[in-house]
Image: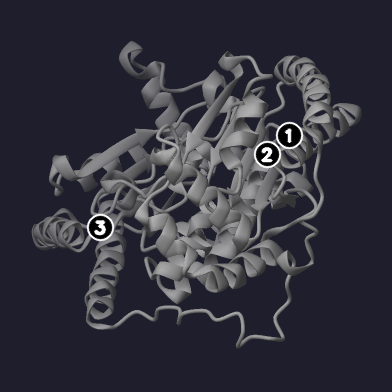
């Protein structure tokens, strides 16, 4: 592919000036429209060393309002970044709605340079490309415009530019030994980039190959590509604003007698006596405390998600877990309705921001599954949005597991009578009244609809590597011990595999 590109293309100065005088104000106007319509934009500059990425970024942003964009120069991972899944550092830099993020090299660095350095085999490459495609698809589905530009020059031109840079002390630092090695093995590095482009060329995030020998020609082609994509996005956003999004009709469990159910078969009669609970709790907490130290020593991250009915016992189970842990090595993340900043990003953005680094534990009191439960039932998202969320969530959890994390998800199950008893108990106790709200009672009226949504969620998103565990919760003692046992078993199993 890259070998076949005609790199002799040039543009006369007069034509360049004429084109740019039209395109710069056009791009400026499109930036304002994207901001007004809440369209996030990510512009990725990749290409061969010395192809002019920095120069072209400067040309591009010259037409833009600097208050509306951020530029990220991506280099080697920091220690903090190495302790997270590789896409974590890019998730946290995704732009809010209406802003533009420009990347000078990007998430593709891994499948270019690490592949060249033979740190990545074929199987790992395909897995990495799958993660990248998933990342871009999720953002694109949520409205982000992703523009990927690959700047092309040949080996001879690259060598000439390297030599010119090395002539001056002020610019020689820009040419590394790795750059010279890639020039020496230019054909192999070009083949690696061919492979990368072919594996990540998608309808939602296509590549634009830019002939960059002549800088004027490259600038005009980049401007043309960016303007074309932004125009399409603006027109699409305006059409979408005139359409009425589909919302999920109120679910009715009684009408859907053929649905598959996991909750209906749960035995809620299981229980545990208080004395037995106290004895077992201490033993399990002592063991969990020991394992926490091993997790830190071996740099194994853990993600624990808790969902369940209101008053289902999430808080009590989390408290018994954290009592056994070193507070420096875990973080409990309570999930409420998204705030104004969070609403300006993809719904998974706020959860990626709180994923643990290696050796640490992240506990989520309610999770990313709100998209397929409360947001679905209450109409806070469209049918299309919650339906695609199953795949998005599975992809995210797969990436966490591939990065070495233990991922467990607990559904705290109680019956309707037990919930009512606990609600009334909270209302009668002044110290617990803060736990019960009018919204809790309103949600209770939609029990059947939530049950249908939960069953579908459990079936579609429970995987062997990131399973759902249904916890029989009518007995708080039994539920807390089961959660501890499951967490301990999962950690011990991982340690045996290390």
- Residue 405 in view (yes/no): yes
The quarter of the picture where the N terminus appears is bottom right
Task: Count the numbered circles shown.
Answer: 3
In this view of the protein, which residue sits in the foreground, 430 or 279?
Answer: 430
- Asked if disc 1 and disc 3 are in contact, CB closer than 8 Å, the reply is no
Is 351 positioned to the left or the right of 169 in the image? right
**Disc marking residue 223:** 3
Above or below: residue 89 compared with residue 305: above
Q: Secondary structure at mark 3?
A: helix
Residue closest to the far front: 428
Residue at the limit of the structure toward the top, as seen here: 169
Give the label on residue 115, or none.
2
Asked whether residue 190 appears in the rendered view, the answer is no
- Residue located at (73% from left, 34% from top): 118
What residue appears at the point 52 percent right and 52 percent down from the top-left corner?
310
Q: Which residue is denoted by mark 1 in the rendering?
A: 118
């Amino acid at each position: 592919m890259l070998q076949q590109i005609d790199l002799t293309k040039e543009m006369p100065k007069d034509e360049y000036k004429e084109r740019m005088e039209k395109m710069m104000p056009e791009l400026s106007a499109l930036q304002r429209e994207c901001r007004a319509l809440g369209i996030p934009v990510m512009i990725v500059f990749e290409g061969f060393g010395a192809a002019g990425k920095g120069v072209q970024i400067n040309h591009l942003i010259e037409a833009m309002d600097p208050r509306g964009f951020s530029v990220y120069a991506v280099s080697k991972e920091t220690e903090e970044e190495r302790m997270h899944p590789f896409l974590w550092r890019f998730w946290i830099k995704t732009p809010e709605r209406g802003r533009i993020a420009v990347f000078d090299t990007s998430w593709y660095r891994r499948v270019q340079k690490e592949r060249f350095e033979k740190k990545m085999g074929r199987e790992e490459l395909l897995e990495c490309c799958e993660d990248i495609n998933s990342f871009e698809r999720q953002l694109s589905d949520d409205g982000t415009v992703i523009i990927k530009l690959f700047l092309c020059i040949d080996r001879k031109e690259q060598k000439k530019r390297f030599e010119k840079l090395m002539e001056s002390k002020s610019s020689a630092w820009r040419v590394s030994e790795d750059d010279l090695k890639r020039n020496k093995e230019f054909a192999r590095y070009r083949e690696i980039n061919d492979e990368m482009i072919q594996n990540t060329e998608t309808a939602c995030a296509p590549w634009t190959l830019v002939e960059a020998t002549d800088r004027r020609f490259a600038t005009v082609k980049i401007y043309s590509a960016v303007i074309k994509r932004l125009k399409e996005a603006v027109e699409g956003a305006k059409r979408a604003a005139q359409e009425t999004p589909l919302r999920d009709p109120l679910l009715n469990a009684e009408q859907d007698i053929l649905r598959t159910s996991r909750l209906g078969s749960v035995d809620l009669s299981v229980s545990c006596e208080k004395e037995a609970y106290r004895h077992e709790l201490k033993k399990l907490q002592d063991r969990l405390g020991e394992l926490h130290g091993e997790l830190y020593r071996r740099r194994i991250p853990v993600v624990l998600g808790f969902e369940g009915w209101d008053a289902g016992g999430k808080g009590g189970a989390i408290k018994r877990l954290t009592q056994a842990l070193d507070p420096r090595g875990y973080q409990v993340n309570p999930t409420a309705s998204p705030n104004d900043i969070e609403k300006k990003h993809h719904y998974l953005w706020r959860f990626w921001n709180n994923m643990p680094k290696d050796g640490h534990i992240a506990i989520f009191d309610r999770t990313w599954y709100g998209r397929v439960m409360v947001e679905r039932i209450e109409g806070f998202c469209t049918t299309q949005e919650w339906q695609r969320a199953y795949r998005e969530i599975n992809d995210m959890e797969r990436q966490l597991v591939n990065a070495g994390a233990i991922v467990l998800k607990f559904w705290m199950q109680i019956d309707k009578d037990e919930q009512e008893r606990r609600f009334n108990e909270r209302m009668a106790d002044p110290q617990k009244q803060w736990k019960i709200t009018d919204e809790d009672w309103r949600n209770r009226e939609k029990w059947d609809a939530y049950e249908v949504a939960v069953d579908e969620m459990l079936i579609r998103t429970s995987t062997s590597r990131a399973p759902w565990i249904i916890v029989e919760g009518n007995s708080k003692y039994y539920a807390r011990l089961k959660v501890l046992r499951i967490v301990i078993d999962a950690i011990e199993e991982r340690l045996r595999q290390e």
